[in-house]
Amino acid sequence: MGNAGNITGWITFFIGLYAVAAGLGEFRRPGFWAKMVGEFRESHALQFLTGLVTLTVGATIYLVNPWNPGDLLSILITVLGAWILIEGVLILAFGDWFLQFARKLMGASNRLWAGLSIVIGLGAIFAALVRLQMA
């Protein structure tokens, strides 16, 4: 259970779990991410709900994670929360443009992005477990 002493570790763990699961999902069903972005581009309701959820998750991470200037992981998680919040705002305000940019960014190299997602996720899980052992 999270408390003020280990909340950064738990947030990092769940972000890592998300990244690994998303990467594995793309490897299991190649083209899943591209199809998902295509479906988002076609549905204004999905754009709105995705933007709202993304904004809420980002704001929650930003507000809940303790800011500690001497702790690199705390800084990274707080900045990540702010970025997720901004991403939600961009999806709400400019969903069509933002998703077109995302589609171009992904391009045909989804396996590369999926592999990178898994590696980053495993790194985050490792960092989280180290942090939680210390707490």
Image (cartoon, rainbow, N blue to C red):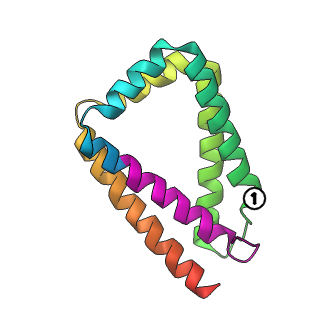
Name which residue lies at 50% across and 24% down. 98
SS of the residue at dot 1?
Answer: helix
Q: How many marks?
A: 1
In this rendering, the answer to whether 117 lies above or below 53 is below
Q: Where, by quadrant of the figure, is residue 39 drawn?
A: top left
Residue at the spot of label 1: 64
In the rendered image, the vertical position of residue 45 relative to residue 61, given as above or below: above
Q: Main secondary structure of the magenta part?
A: helix
The single residue placed furthest to the bottom in the displayed view is 134
Q: Residue at x 66, y 45 (%)?
A: 57
Q: Nearer the viewer, residue 75 or 33?
A: 33
State whether residue 53 is above or below residue 27.
above
- Taking 66 as reference, is 110 left or right? left
Within the image, what quadrant is residue 49 found in?
A: top right
Residue placed at 41% from the left, 25% from the top?
37
Residue 105 at least partly seen? yes
Label 1 CA crowd tier, 10 Å (few <14, some 14–19, many 20+): some
| Residue 74, image x, y percentages | 64, 67
Please say whether residue 66 is one of the residues in the magenta stretch.
no
Viewport quadrant of the C terminus: bottom right
Q: Amino acid at mark 1?
A: Val
What's drawn in magenta, residue-wise?
1-22
Q: Position of residue 77 (x, y in %)?
A: 61, 60
15 in the magenta segment: yes
Where is residue 80? Give x, y as percent. 59, 52
Residue 91: x and y in percent read 58, 26
> Can residue 90 be seen here?
no
Quarter holding the N terminus is bottom right
Can you say whether 36 is above or below 79 in the image?
A: above
